[in-house]
Every structure is written in structure tokens, then in C-alpha cells.
Image (cartoon, rainbow, N blue to C red):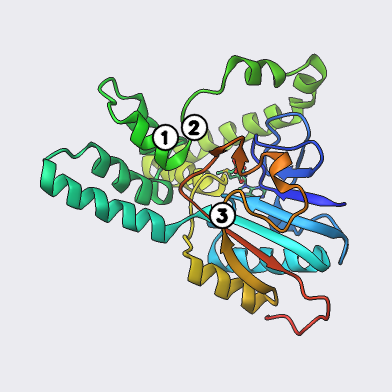
Amino acid sequence: MKLVNVGCGQHISTEWINLDLVSGVRGVTRHDLRQGLPFSANQCDVVYHSHLLEHLTPTEARAFLLDCYRVLRPGGILRVVVPDLEGIARAYLRSLEASDQTGNTEDLDWMRIELLDQMVREYSGGTMRSFVDQSNFCNRPFVQSRIGDELFPPDKAFRQRNRKTFVQRLRRFPAKLTKLRRAVILGAVAVLGGRSDYRALKEGRFRQSGEIHRWMYDRISLCCLLGEIGFMEAGPCRPDESQIPNFEDYQLDSVGSRIRKPDSLFVEAIKPEKLIAQAA
Ligand SMILES: C[S@@+](CC[C@H](N)C(=O)[O-])C[C@H]1O[C@@H](n2cnc3c(N)ncnc32)[C@H](O)[C@@H]1O
């Protein structure tokens, strides 16, 4: 079985081919999906991506999904996980109404951030990180029920498993040179263009870094988009439910009985056995 996890971040399964723009942990191959997936047509059994699609512009997302379609074999499965716009909007309204009743605004403050911060932030971690780092952060159970453990430090075992070896640190040398070159360019822009050009370049680079959300999806818009691409049977499913054989064993969307990213919409779709014309 050829199983591909695109935009995998740090949460991977070694039985999958794991691709990401940045290769932070062992077992991840660095690849920018905007260059196209590095597989020939009809080669993969499963393509999975979690909290990736919303990082692409709608135009990039359509091109990427067409590419997922291309690399999947007929009958192959696409599993897409994204933040659930409908669920987030409903939770925001619920906390707004609760706040009217109780006068407490902590959950509402979080929901506003959850809805907006990843689209507008100008620095890594954004207001989400500042919210959980504040000394009077008092609604951790609510925040965890919304987004899981993402903003909370990984355990010691995880850090030890992923400690960089000497060879890995050596391999990062070209990336360090790139960093240096970018710093020199930024310095030159500050000198020649002044403060506003410096800020424009810095913000533009950050927006290109893969951390920003560029769109959001609900169950209807995502399933319609997959249908337009040529997939069939596109429909939402539960986090622990999948047509991918033994999916729960890989612990990608749920770890034991815990849903990893509770704020998500989970959708699966199939590439038809009998190919129909693809949307342009
Ligand atoms: C929010 S993280 C999700 C990580 C992981 N899939 C998960 O569910 O925990 C988004 C990931 O998409 C990656 N990413 C964003 N743009 C990308 C691109 N153009 N090519 C490959 N990976 C990309 C980022 O580097 C980041 O690791």
C-alpha cells in the first residue's frame, strides 16, 4: 500500500510517506506541494492531509486537489481534515450567548481568536500562543476541548525521540545559509527602503511560510469542491471512522480514544474506478 501524508508537520506514521514544507522530525521528506506531488499518475492508494488545505489560497487548493486526484489510483481514497468553519462559527455563537448570560468572556475571547487569528497573524504562534501563555490563562480545559494539545508542550519522550543527531544538524547547514542570505536581504531592504518596506517584506515572508490560513471550509463547500475535481462519494465522517484499511492503527486523527484535533471537519472521497472528465 502506498500511503501519503502531505503537510504532515510533526505528527507522522512511519508506514506512510510523510511530506512537508519543513522537515522538523525524522521520517519527513521536505517538499513544497505547490511544485506538484512527487509521484506519477495512479500510483498512490491513499492521500491524507490534515490541517493543510486551509493554508493554501483557493486557487492553490484546487490545483493541489487535482494533483491528489492525479496521483491516486482509481478506487484510491482521499482523506481531508480541515478546521470546521461551521463548527467554529457555531461554538463562537454559543459562547457569545453564554457570555450574555454569565458575563464571563474567557471562552468567547478564545473563540474569536480561534476564528480569526490564523488568518491575520503577523508572527509565529500569533494571538493563540499569547492567549495560552498569559499569566491569568484560566480556561485551558475549554481551549483543549476545542483544539486538542497543539498549543501545549509535547512530552519529554517526544522531545527525546526527535532530538537531532549530529548528521541531521550538519544537514541543516544549507538551511542556515539560506537564513543568513534572507537576513542580509532584509537588512538591505531596511537600509534602502526604510521601515515600511522592511515590515512589508517581513510580513510577506511570514505569510508565505505555510503558517497562515488562506481560506476555510464547511462540509458543503469542501464536498462540492471534491465533487468538482472528479471525486465521488465525498462526505463527512467521524474522526475514528475511515474507509482506509486499519486507519485507527496509524493514530493520525485519534490517539487512543482522544481526538487529536477536535475542531476539525473530516471528509473522505474516492477516485472513481471508471474515470470521468476532471474539472479544469
Ligand atoms: C497546521 S500544520 C498541520 C500539521 C499536521 N498535518 C497535523 O495535522 O498536525 C500545517 C502543515 O502544513 C505544512 N505546509 C504548509 N504549506 C505547505 C506546502 N506548500 N507544502 C508542504 N507543506 C506545507 C506546514 O509546514 C505545516 O507543517
Q: At which x and y percent is residue 150?
A: 50, 34
Give the residue type that dot 3 points to: Arg
- Within 8 Å: ligand 1 and the Cβ of disc 2? no
User: Which quadrant of the view contains residue 39?
Assistant: bottom right
Q: Please give left or right for residue 19 compared with residue 90 in the image.
A: right
For residue 248, above or below residue 89: above
Give the residue type that dot 2 points to: Asp
**Within the displayed image, which quadrant is ligand 1 positioned in?**
top right
Q: Distance between the residues labelled 1 and 3?
A: 19 Å
Front position in the image: 169 or 81 = 81
How many numbered marks have been drawn onto this rendered protein structure? 3
| Residue behind mark 1 | 144
Dot placed on the residue nearer the N-terminal end, 3 or 2 = 2
For residue 27, above or below residue 216: above
Q: Residue at x 36, y 29 (%)?
A: 132
Q: How far apart are marks 2 and 1 (CA)?
A: 6 Å
| Residue behind mark 2 | 149
